[in-house]
Amino acid sequence: MSMSAVRNRSQTVLLSLLDALVDPARRERTALVALAAYAAVWTLYGAIAKGSQDIHFDMGEMVAWSREVTLGTTKHPPLGAWLVRIWFSVFPLADWSYYCFAILLATLALWFAWTMSTPYLDARKRVVGLALLTLVPFYNFHALKFNANTVMIPLWAATTWLFLRSFETRSLPFAALAGLAAAAAMLGKYWSIFLLVSLAIAAIADPRRSAYFRSPAPYVTVAVGALALTPHIVWLYFNHFAAFDYALASHPASWATTISSCFAYVVGALAYLVVPTLIAVAFARPDRAAIGDTLWPSDPSRRLVLLSFALPLLLPAIAALVTHEEIVSLWAMGSMTLFPVVLLSSPRVAVSRAAAAVILGIALALPLLATAAAPAIAVIVHRNGISNFATHYRLVAGAIEKAWHETTDRPLRIVGSYDNLVNGVAFYLVDQPSTFEVISPVRTPWIDEARIARDGVALVCPLTVQECVRAVDARAAKEPRSRRVEVEISRRYFGVSDPAVRYLIVTIAPH
């Protein structure tokens, strides 16, 4: 088949898909099928491209927390761990399954974006907007690493959508759902306070605020959200607000560093939008009036959308300047849902059918090309190496299990190390033990000395991490029944071994 025939065939397919996504009778079903395919392809990419490494330790930490189901943790609120527990109660505890879970949450956010755009964009612009949003790395490459940042992506999308519907319609069901979504966002990460404050400011700044605040809607939202958060707030009170201490103490900075990080945060967050913005501008070719109407719409509904998009991006930088905290652009993950509406909702912006088909084609090509490149990516990562011993978690887990079974016939209930290693290794241990941080035990409050004595513990450290080795040696010295071994571990991938690392493993049998 000639190149011309291939181009013609591709164009026909894209136009047919575009027509299906525009047709009122078919568009919702077609969008769901397209998003399901999107999730499947990106799951495949994750499983292949990350095949030369093990899951990220942040993902392992979520699994570790999910085994200690409570109303909170010492670092972040608990919703991410709850979701992980639900997922792995149904699906196998495997890398591919975890990547599928992570990308499904990002895909859910895309569906919220698709639904949210209905009142603001015509049918063709809705398709273009969704296509452009899939080009933002937060919805694919970054989304594959599930943690307290990525969990914000669907939660912020849901909260923003329901708030806008509640404001525009003053519907009590939408108001109640907005409250539940806001509570869920806060239970995902406390950073979500910036979203809630931003939406409140946007509502107050809107010229239609009188009708909204005279209705029951905002008060239903606040009441439902407060009620949903009450159990967690009570938990925080009885646990001395430990998670707040972590949030406030983990990123202090000098004045110069704060200013620099705030600038980098805003620039970095906007940089993620450069490619889709340039594509939209190249095909829509907006004139000066269209650009002005996009940057500051005359229509109150669109201006509310603009504020709801811009304020959650900018408010954290202002807060960081006040509190002298360092912030990073990755924390803006949840802020992108309204980007297509802001970019395309002006009546002065027009996108032709042919241009929409090309943009849709670009969006379809990205995951396919990424998946085609995934094997090479895995090989390159293996050859270049990766930090935090992330190629060895599975192999270290096997060495721990061997040492443990040579020590006792009891199940392994506790595994200990420093934070990154213990969270990565715990995911691969068959007995699914609880984690114990040997350097900062306060971060694993579910483990105490009585439990260690009752269940025993397996401790592991790379010999190069001296702080961990000292902590393990100090504990082993107090236990005459401890057993100490050293193992050398190297991972082979496509016939190539990565640099070997020696690990200390200490097993202490149950009393």
Image (spheres, rainbow, N blue to C red):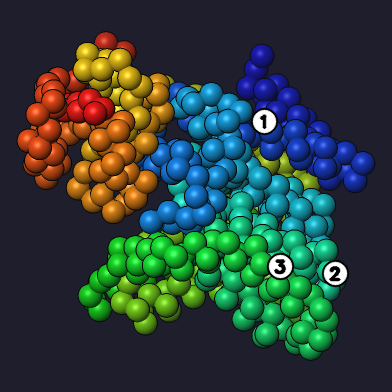
Q: Residue at x 41, y 39 (%)?
A: 64
Q: Quadrant of residue 262?
A: bottom left
Outermost residue toward the top in this view = 495
With respect to residue 143, does 337 lie above or below? Answer: below
Is 339 displayed left or right of 63 in the figure? right
- Amino acid type, residue under disc 1 in the picture: Ala
User: Viewer-proximal residue, 442 or 48?
Assistant: 442
For marks 1 and 3 on the same chain, the one whose residue lies earlier in the sequence? 1
Q: Residue at x 25, y 43 (%)?
A: 449
Q: Residue at x 61, y 58 (%)?
A: 184
Q: Which mark is residue 37?
A: 1
Q: Which mark is residue 171?
A: 2
User: Viewer-proximal residue, 452 or 188?
Assistant: 452
Is 216 displayed left or right of 134 in the figure? right
Could you say whether the residue bearing mark 1 is in a helix, strand or loop? helix
With respect to residue 24, does 311 lie above or below? Answer: below
* Mark 1: few/some/many CA within 10 Å (<14, 14-19, 20+): few
The answer to the question of whether label 1 and label 3 lie on touching residues, with beta carbons closer than 8 A, is no
Please provide percent x and percent y for residue 474. 9, 41
Question: Viewer-nearest of labels 1 and 3?
Answer: 3
Q: Quadrant of residue 479?
A: top left
- Amino acid type, residue under disc 3 in the picture: Val
Is 315 displayed left or right of 391 in the figure? right
Question: Viewer-nearest of labels 1 and 2?
Answer: 2
For marks 1 and 2 on the same chain, the one whose residue lies earlier in the sequence? 1
- Amino acid type, residue under disc 2 in the picture: Ser
Q: Which mark is residue 83?
A: none
Q: Which residue is identified by label 3?
A: 224
User: Viewer-proximal residue, 459 or 33?
Assistant: 459
